[in-house]
Amino acid sequence: MTEDVKARKFSTLFRWFDRNGDGQLTRDDFQQMADMFAGLVREGAEENAAAMRAAFETWWQLLLAHGDRDGSGQISPHEFITVMEADVTDPQHFEQAVLAIADALMRALDTDQDGVLSQAEYVRMYDVLGIPPVHSEAAFRLLDQDGDGSLSHAEFRTAITDFYLSDDPKAPGNWLLGPIDQAA
Ligand SMILES: [Ca+2]
Ligand SMILES: [Ca+2]
Ligand SMILES: [Ca+2]
């Protein structure tokens, strides 16, 4: 069962990334994701938008280089789950692609720039990134591990890392995109 937890999370992630809904991931999907994330960045923080775009490009290149087994230039759901588990979650790749996006996202969401995310700042992520907000308040409470009412940079990084690396079906970070799809 432990393998299933990550496979289910990556299936959820695949459906979110597949912007044009054609059942495959392409560079176009990644550019649309990057545009959506860059749309969160406040004026005057263009280097933050650039960091997001660079990290999404890095991620896409990792998928192509390690995951495109049939050389089609597209990543199928099966290829995605395999390459995510084998290569993208390798520590160096994970830092350059996933955590680079997490850091830029945290900076963009922290609109009052006090270094932590309030619940309102966190919930805005769901609106802008098109994630159903139904479970956002429950997720916030789970991710706020010290219960001080805000998400620190460390708590946010832990959430992202749990989502990608944890086999634990109860890891709080699993809630990042809402409940894991039990049917997947
Ligand atoms: Ca697609
Ligand atoms: Ca804040
Ligand atoms: Ca906290």
Image (cartoon, rainbow, N blue to C red):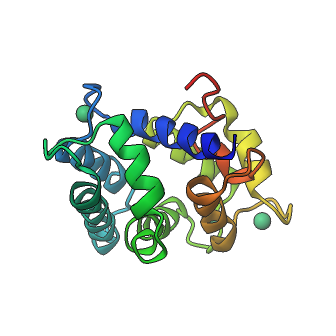
* Residue 20 pos. (x, y %): 25, 29
* Residue 173 pos. (x, y %): 67, 53
The image quadrant that residue 72 belongs to is top left
- Residue 35 lies left or right of residue 128; in this view the side is left
Residue at position x 38%, y 62% from top?
42
- Residue 11 lies left or right of residue 143; in this view the side is left
Residue at position x 66%, y 73% from top?
154
Q: Is residue 13 above or below residue 158?
A: above
Q: Nearer the viewer, residue 90 or 19?
A: 90
Determine the residue located farthest toward the top in the rendered image.
Answer: 183
Residue at position x 80%, y 59% from top?
149
Ligand 3 in which quarter: bottom right
The image quadrant that residue 48 belongs to is bottom left
Q: How many marks?
A: 0
Determine the residue located farthest toward the left in the rendered image.
Answer: 72
* Residue 17 pos. (x, y %): 36, 40
Residue at position x 68%, y 46% from top?
2
Q: Nearer the viewer, residue 30 or 119?
A: 30
Please identify the quadrant where the C terminus is shown.
top right
Q: Is residue 45 above or below residue 86?
A: below
Q: Nearer the viewer, residue 78 or 155?
A: 78
- Residue 125 lies left or right of residue 38; in this view the side is right
Please identify the quadrant where the N terminus is shown.
top right
Q: Nearer the viewer, residue 151 or 164?
A: 164
Determine the residue located farthest toward the bottom in the rendered image.
Answer: 92
* Residue 153 pos. (x, y %): 63, 72
